[in-house]
Amino acid sequence: MERKRHTLPYFLVILGIFSAFIAHGKSMPFAAGSIMNIDEIVPGMKGYGKTVFIGDRIGIFNVEVLGILRNWEAKSNMILVRMSGGPLEKSGIIAGMSGSPVYIGNRLIGAVAYGWSFAKDAIAGITPINEMKNTLLNIPAQEEGLSLASAGWELPSLLQSDPVTGSPAPSLAPQSQEITSYDFGKIKLTPILSPFIVSGVSSDVLQRMRPLFQTYGLYPVQGGSSVSYSDMVGRPKLVPGASVAAILIRGDLSAAVVGTVTYIEGDNVLAFGHPFLQTGNADLPMASAYVYTVLSSQSNSVKMASPVEIIGRINQDRRAGIGGILGESARMIPCRIEVEGSQKLEHNFEIADNKLLTPSLILMAAQSAVLSTERKLGEKSVRIRLSAQIEGYEKPIVVENVFYELDQSWFSLNHIVQPFTMIINNQFQSVRINRIDLKITVLDSRQTAYIESIRVDKKQVKPGDTLRVDVCLKPFTGESFYQTVMMHIPEDTLPGSMVNVTACDATFGQALNLGRAAGKYLPTNFEQLLRYIENMERNNNLMVRVLLAKKGLTYKGEGFPSLPASMLSVMSFSNQSGVGPLFDEVVSRVPTSYVLNGNQTIPVAVK
C-alpha cells in the first residue's frame, strides 16, 4: 500500500520534466527505440513537429499521417502528413521549415521536407529519419568535395556581344522558369523552398539574380546581417527544431540559407530533409539562426531570419538532406571589391568556396557594389580588373578589360566573371582560390572611338623592312586623329607575295584569332588555359596585324608558325589528333584611352 501512495507523485514529477522539455524545445533523452521505422507508421496516426516561428524559441505544430508514398523516387519513401497549429492555418507550409523534426508517440519519424506547388492546405512530405541517417552519417569523409565541372569547356561568347553598343552577353544563370510563376496545368511535388537571406545587396540586383537562385530551390529575401547576442535572451543552442543556416557570404555583405535541425547524434547534425545543391561532399560554415517573424504570402510564406553564430561545418549535401559537424570550420575565400566613380567605396567579405555558387555570388556582390554608388541609367565607361590568387602560383591571375555601357546591361561584369568561372571549373586540375580582388572604375562619359581608315608609308616592302601604319581614330563627338604603329616585316617573308595589313578592335581580332589558329584557343592543359585567359583581347587595344604568306600548324594548343616545308607536309597529313592549321602573322597591340570599334584592311606587296 505504501508503494502505491508514492507512485502518483513520481509520475507527476516525470510528467512535469517531460512537459518542461517540450515547452523549451529540448530533445528528450529517449532510449534506443526513440526512432520509429516507416513500417510502423499507418494512416491516421497523430503526432507533433518542432520548428521556430519567432526568435529562437521552438514551437510545436500538429501532424496527422495521411499515408506512405513508397518508392516515390528510386529507393526513397515519403510520409505524407497534414500539418496544423501555430501560424500554419494562415501561412500554409513556410519556407525555412525544411528539416523540422516530426514525432509520433515521442519517437522521431523524419523531417518535413516537401510540399505541393499551389496547395492551399499545409500538406507536406516527410523524409524518413532512417533514410537521412543512412545517407548522411554512413558516408566516409573526404577532403575534397565533388567537382561540378563538366568534361569540356567553352570559349566565352565574345563574338555574340558588342562592347561598344553594350548589347548583353549570355547570362551565367541557367535559363529556367521561376518557381512562383503560375502554371495552372502543373501541380508538382517539390522541396520546400529555403529562405536565401541576403543583406547589403541592392533589391534590383537580387531581383535580377532571382531566376538563378530559384533554380536551386532558394527563395531570395532581403534581411539583416548577423544578429548580436545583445538582441537575444541567452545564447542559442542547436537542438532538433532549432533554426540553422548555411553561410555563403559574411562581412560587409552577407548571404545565408536557412532551414531547421532534424537530428543530432554526438557532434553530427542532420537538417533540411532535402538537398541544398546536392553536391555530395560540401564545405560550408554552419550557423545558428534567429527568426524575426513569419511572413505569410499567397505565393510563398517565409521565415524572416538572420544567422547568429558559426558553430560548425556542413560537410554533406545529398538527396536526403544536409549533414554537418559541430566545432569544425569551413574554408572561405577572402574578397575585396573596390568601386571608384562618383564615390570611392570598398567592400570586404568572405565567400563560400564552391565551384557552382562562387562565380554567381561574386557577380551579385559586384553588381550591388556598383549600384551602391553609381547611377543606373545613362552612358558610362567601365574599367574592371579581377585578380585571383591561386594556391601554388606566386603571381595572381589577372583578368582586365574596358567597356562602354548604355544603361545598366551588366555585360562588362559578365565578361570578367566568365573567365574566372573557366578557371575554377577547369577540367585539367583542381584549383584552390586563396583571394579575390575586384576593382571597378566608372566614368559617367562615353569614351569610344571608331577605326575610320588606315594608311601605310609605302605600298611595297622588302623582307626585314619596317612599315609605318597610321590608323585614323574618330572619337565619339571628338576630332579624328592618327595613331602610328610601326610593324616589322620578318626576314623570311616570301618575296613576290602580298600581305594584308589590318587594324581592328578586340571583337574582330578575336574572330581572326579563331579563324587563323583555332587550335591555339582550345587549351590542352591548365597552363595554356591561364595563358589564354590572361591574354584575352582588350577592348581599348588597337590591334594592327600583318598576315604573311606562310603557313604553320598548331599541335595540342601550341603554335608552330615557321616549320620547314618537309615537316609541315608530314605533320599536315599526320594521323595524330590535335593538329590544326596556323597562319603566320605579326601582331601589335597599342593601348588607347577608348573602347574601340571597327576594322580596316589594306594590301601591301613584298618586293
Image (spheres, rainbow, N blue to C red):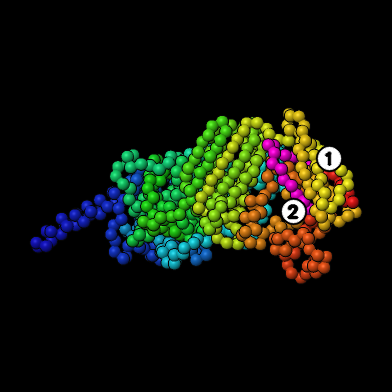
Q: How many marks?
A: 2
Say which label, 1 or 2, has the lower sequence index. 1
Find the residue positioned furthest to the left: 2
Distance from the alpha carbon under mark 1 to that under mark 2: 26 Å
Q: Nearer the viewer, residue 230 or 30?
A: 230
* Placement of 300 over or under 562, stated as above or below: above
The image shows residue 443 at horizontal and vertical percentages of 62, 33
Residue at 50% across, 38% down: 346
- 475 relative position to 218: left or right: right
Q: Which mark is residue 401?
A: none
SS for dot 2: helix
Q: Amino acid at mark 1?
A: Arg
* Placement of 162 over or under 571, stated as above or below: above
Q: Which residue is mark 2?
A: 514
The segment highlighted magenta reads 585-600
Inspect the magenta stretch and tell me whether residue 597 lies in it: yes
Residue 589 at least partly seen: yes
Q: Which mark is residue 455?
A: 1
Inspect the magenta stretch and tell me whether residue 88 lies in it: no
- 558 relative position to 25: left or right: right
Residue at 50% across, 66% down: 75
